[in-house]
């Protein structure tokens, strides 16, 4: 009798931090466990960090240790993408940080986005690629999640109670078809800049960038930066400067969720509403295109007048 193998819809891949810090270990196990409970999903963990092989075994997910690293021993995004692409069994890939909790609405958003775009592909073949992202909800957590029946409702309630929707800067996951991002610079994971470049690249290629914030709850479990030198944020790390260089400069890491082309709302794809920040962002992009010949420091003053700086500083920091 022939056995029909059911292929997963999405491959989630991530490079977790070492499991040596008890709090980091807890939130990463929480996150990965939530992924394994999703329908039609496979999980790939990348790296040789302390405790990772054991966690992958305990959580029954695939583990690939041989990810390429920079001189400081930090995994490279390019290697992560290559390994995930070569070892996945799905048409959709999703790079995600290992502290993010997912619920079934995540898979539903991916299905809806792909389906809605498929209807348009008959008229516009350029829509065969897309990128799905969203804002996250920041959540203070001190205990292992109880994943018994109803855990999603309990989580939603406590997260809503803390009421910390992160600003639309920085992205903790990107979901896309395998045909996207076939060439990635050697960005370093866990440092600033590469996620902004992902949005820049999608916009440059003309791919729909879909913000699914209204349709899903993506939960970030808050943590400190004790895993980085001096406990400082990744914005202050030297590898961030290298990420910026590889991205092509500051202009290409200015992209945020404000640069999305669509929003997934109520089962439909809608154009984002023109808020003040979105309008300012569109003007900035127009000025950058118009005065492309200026040096970056001069272009910054033209594209970002001082009267905008206070509002933009918090968003892009």
Image: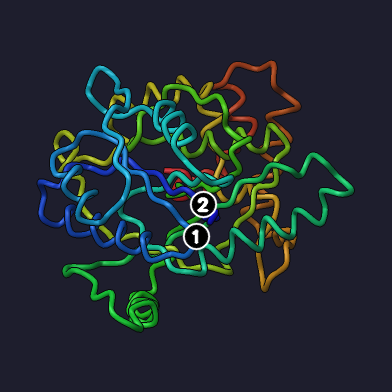
What x and y, as percent, mark residue 257?
56, 50
Label 2 to label 1: alpha-carbon separation: 7 Å
Q: Earlier in the sequence, mark 2 or mark 1?
A: 2
In the foreground, 53 or 276: 53
Q: Which image quarter: residue 64?
A: top left
Q: Which residue is drawn at 19% across and 50% down?
A: 55
Q: Do the residues labelled 2 and 1 touch (CB within 8 Å)?
A: yes
In the foreground, 295 or 221: 221
Question: Taking the image as drawn, is residue 6 in sight?
Answer: no
Vertical placement of residue 262 versus 297, above or below: below
SS assignment at label 2: strand
- Tell me the residue that label 2 is attached to: 10
Tell me which colouring the rendered structure shows.
Answer: rainbow
What x and y, as percent, mark residue 102?
41, 63
In the foreground, 191 or 143: 143
Total numbered badges shown on the rendered structure: 2
Q: Which image quarter: residue 207?
A: top right
Near mark 1 (Cα within 10 A), the count class, few <14, some 14-19 or many ≥20, is some
SS assignment at label 1: loop
Q: Which mark is residue 40?
A: 1
Vertical placement of residue 127 versus 300, above or below: below
């Amino acid at each position: 009798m022939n056995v029909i193998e059911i292929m997963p819809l999405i491959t989630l891949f991530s490079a977790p931090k070492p499991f040596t810090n008890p709090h980091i270990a807890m939130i990463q196990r929480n996150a990965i466990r939530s992924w394994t409970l999703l329908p039609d999903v496979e999980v790939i963990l990348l790296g040789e960090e302390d405790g990772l092989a054991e966690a992958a075994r305990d959580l029954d997910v695939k583990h690939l240790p041989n990810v390429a690293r920079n001189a400081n021993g930090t995994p490279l995004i390019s290697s992560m993408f290559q390994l995930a692409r070569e070892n996945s069994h799905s048409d959709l890939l999703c790079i995600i940080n290992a502290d993010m909790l997912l619920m079934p609405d995540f898979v539903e958003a991916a299905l809806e986005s792909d389906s809605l775009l498929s209807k348009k592909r008959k008229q516009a073949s350029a829509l065969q690629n897309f990128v799905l992202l969203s804002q996250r909800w920041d959540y203070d957590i001190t205990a292992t999640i109880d994943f018994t029946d109803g855990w999603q409702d309990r989580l939603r309630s406590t997260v809503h109670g803390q009421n910390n929707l992160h600003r639309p800067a920085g992205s903790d996951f990107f979901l896309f078809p395998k045909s996207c991002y076939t060439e990635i610079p050697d960005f370093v994971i866990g440092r600033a800049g590469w996620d902004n470049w992902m949005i820049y690249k999608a916009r440059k290629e003309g791919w729909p960038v879909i913000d699914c914030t209204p349709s899903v709850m993506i939960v970030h479990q808050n943590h400190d930066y004790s895993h980085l030198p001096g406990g400082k944020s990744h914005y202050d790390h030297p590898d961030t400067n290298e990420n910026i260089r590889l991205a092509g400069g500051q202009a290409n890491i200015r992209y945020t969720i404000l640069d999305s082309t669509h929003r997934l709302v109520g089962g439909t794809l809608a154009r984002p509403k023109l808020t003040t920040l979105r309008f300012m962002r569109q003007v900035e992009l127009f000025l950058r295109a118009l005065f492309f010949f200026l040096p970056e420091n001069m272009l910054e003053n033209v594209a970002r007048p001082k009267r905008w700086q206070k509002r933009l500083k918090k968003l892009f920091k």
